[in-house]
Image (tube, helix red, strand yellow):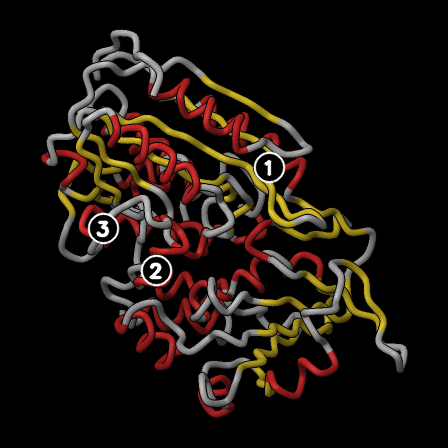
Amino acid sequence: MAAPSSCGKGKAMKEIYMTNREGISREELEKLVDQVLVQYSDLKKVLIVPPDYTRCYSYAGEITQIMYRKLDAAGVTVHVIPALGTHMPMDDVEIQKFFGDVVPKENILVHHWQTDTVKLGTIPGEVVSKISEGLYDEEIEIEVNHLLVDGGYDRIFSVGQVVPHEVVGMANYSKNLFVGLGGRSMINKSHFVSAICGMEQALGVMDSPARMLYDYAQQHCIDGKLPVSFILTVTSETKDGVILQGLFADDSRKPFELACELSQELNIVHMERRAKKMVTYLDPEELKTTWVGNKGIYRTRMAVADGGELLILAPGVKAFGENEEMDSMTRKYGYKGRDYVLELYRKGAFEGRTMSAAHLIQGSSDGRFTITYATIPENLSKEEVESVGFQWADYNEVSKRYDPAVLKDGWNMTEDGEEFYYVGTPALGLWKCDD
């Protein structure tokens, strides 16, 4: 690592931004990380917060490896805690793929959203009511993993990808902390506020209702109080694979805003007409539950025609929830429409689990189009899939007609004349028709 200049942990980071639509090279990425770290001469203990494995296309794994290697060589103690939220922890294979041989397993910490948090403050009910335009007025506790407060870290680097998102509009920035390392109240209630305000009002929007909640928490509980710096990426998929096209680093909201502008340009596909049939593919290594696999629904729903069909090719999906609690809630109530779920909510069915209600609302098309999950029967059976409100197809059979190995992103045509629109990596963008 280059010789650092003096910079105490209380001082603000110098803004570092780079965009290259042709792709930022590994050499350029190394130099950008150097520009971040060179500002800190007195670091003894650092925490890096990358996303979980479902964001494997974020370049956060590569950045974490670079930072860890440089800091470790400089004698700094470095811990890595993936921003899991309610997602399952990485297994050994995922750890190897995300962090390589660089980050020792014993230095990778696990966030337990139900037990590991401390309360920093609250978002008052009147603020929540104003943000939700009167649809929700409950106070929200602001919780984060206790290590952010009492871990003794000189600097906390939150690393993640800005991309259209179904809950917060544009992912990452403070969401990485308040959801990725958050607790029950914030996770549940912010997701519910987003759901009842309407997903279509949030997708691809920077200042969504959920983002306003996280901004309030950031301004009142993080800024000037915890030594947090943000390193944000923008990536997209090309014919040569996923490339890094933007990196934005700073302590403020500005890098997030700049990353949003680039992501909205690169990651939103504006279609000239809606698809009567949409087919999307869930990478079996990345997406293993409908909880995260429903990105195939969220990111394409504004491009599916009324009365159309969304076919989700899901060879790796084996469960509904990322944990037993959310899996059981999905199996119990299913993806059966907004009104159905809200009626259950009013009856107290989701006490302490409102993120489940939000997820079930967002995972339904409310009858506007059909949703078919094509799974491998041994992973998730026809009976299980249909019990939660989806239609089912056998992936082994359906993939012969819609083979992800040969399909191209965009409009396709089968030999017998069926036209459909294919999305190979829904997590990397948003597809919408602007009519």
The residue under the point 45% across, 56% down is 195
Q: Above or below — where is 324 with respect to 24? A: below
In this rendering, does residue 421 appear at all?
A: yes
Residue 303 lies left or right of residue 177; in this view the side is right
The residue under the point 54% across, 43% down is 163
Q: Above or below — where is 294 with respect to 149? A: below
The residue under the point 19% across, 44% down is 145
Pointer 3 or 1: first along the chain: 3
Q: Report helix, strand or loop for mark 3.
A: loop
Q: Nearer the viewer, residue 334 or 399?
A: 399
Report, in whole angstroms, how far the alpha carbon at label 2 lies from the one at label 3: 11 Å
| Circle 2: residue type | Met
Q: Report helix, strand or loop for mark 1.
A: helix
Pointer 2 or 3: first along the chain: 3
| Circle 3: residue type | Gly
For the residue carrying disc 1, how many other residues have a C-alpha within 10 Å: few (<14), some (14-19), or many (20+)? many
Which mark, by number, is residue 263? Answer: 1
Residue 359 is situated, as x and y percent measured from the top left of the image, at: 42, 63
| Circle 1: residue type | Ser
Q: Nearer the viewer, mark 2 or mark 1?
A: 1
Q: Which residue is mark 2?
A: 355
Report, in whole angstroms, how far the alpha carbon at label 2 lies from the one at label 1: 26 Å
Residue 184 is situated, as x and y percent measured from the top left of the image, at: 23, 54
Numbered circles on residues, count: 3
Report, in whole angstroms, how far the alpha carbon at label 3 lies from the one at label 1: 28 Å
Q: Nearer the viewer, mark 2 or mark 3?
A: 3
Q: Above or below — where is 53 with respect to 219? A: below
Q: Which residue is mark 3?
A: 183
